[in-house]
Image: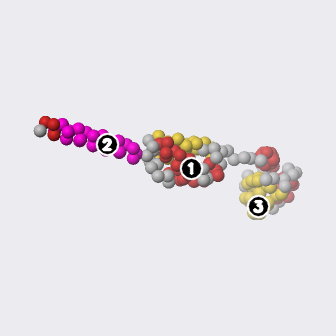
Amino acid sequence: MKKMKKIRLISMLALAIMVAVGATSCKPKDADIQKAVQTAVAANPDATGVTVAVEKGVVTLTGEVKDEAASMAINGLAAAVKNVKSVVNNMTIAAPLVNPVDAQLMSALVDALKDNPTVVAAVKEGVISLTGEIKKSDLPKLLQKVSALKPVKIDNQLTIK
């Protein structure tokens, strides 16, 4: 009878060990999750500089992306991967590239517009866009100052009052 109890005890211990090993082997491994997230993120062409790290099912994304939309899209791809508990988005947004000609024109416009506080100017690819309000008598002088800056074009959308 003692022998039976001993066999039963050993059998129960063996069963418990098998269940424990089986339960831990079913848990998703961080390395597997990381590989799956990297594959998913790679589908987005804006994710070339993004790195993925995983710890206990929590994904951390780092790197630089071009804009907030790219950041959100990549975050969504990572979050959709099976077994991802959460995503920590540490990606940074790249500073927009400013055309040096545009920066120079914008700088010069500050002086050209100083007498017209109701006029707003924007510059893109050498084109100066003017918006806001201006007196009819001030318009020729302002347009002369802006033309002297030699922009590609002047997009005059001013309202004359």
Q: Position of residue 43 (x, y in %)?
A: 60, 53
Q: Is residue 44 left or right of residue 159?
A: left
Question: Is residue 117 within the magenta segment?
Answer: no
Position in image of residue 30 (x %, y %):
47, 42
Disc 2 to disc 1, how far (Cα)? 33 Å
Placement of the C terminus among the 4 image quadrants? bottom right
Residue at mark 2: 18
Compared across the picture, whether 108 is left or right of 40 comes to: right
Kindly indicate whether the residue at mark 2 contacts the one at mark 3 (C-beta within 8 angstroms): no
Q: Give amino acid for label 3.
A: Leu
Q: Nearer the viewer, mark 3 or mark 2?
A: 2
Q: Nearer the viewer, mark 2 or mark 1?
A: 2
10 Å crowding of disc 1: few (<14), some (14-19), many (20+): some
| Residue ID at (77%, 47%) | 99
**On the image, numbered disc 1 is attached to which residue?**
39
Spot occupied by residue 102 in the image (x, y as percentages of width and height): 78, 49
Horizontally, residue 43 falls left or right of residue 134, namely left
N-terminal of the pair, mark 2 or mark 1, is 2
Give the magenta range. Answer: 5-27
Q: Position of residue 24 (x, y in %)?
A: 37, 43
Quadrant location, the N terminus: top left
Closer to us: 1 or 15: 1
Which secondary structure class fits the magenta region best? Answer: helix
Foreground tag (3 vs 1) = 1
The residue tagged 3 is 158
Whether residue 34 is visible to the viewer of this picture, yes or no, is: yes
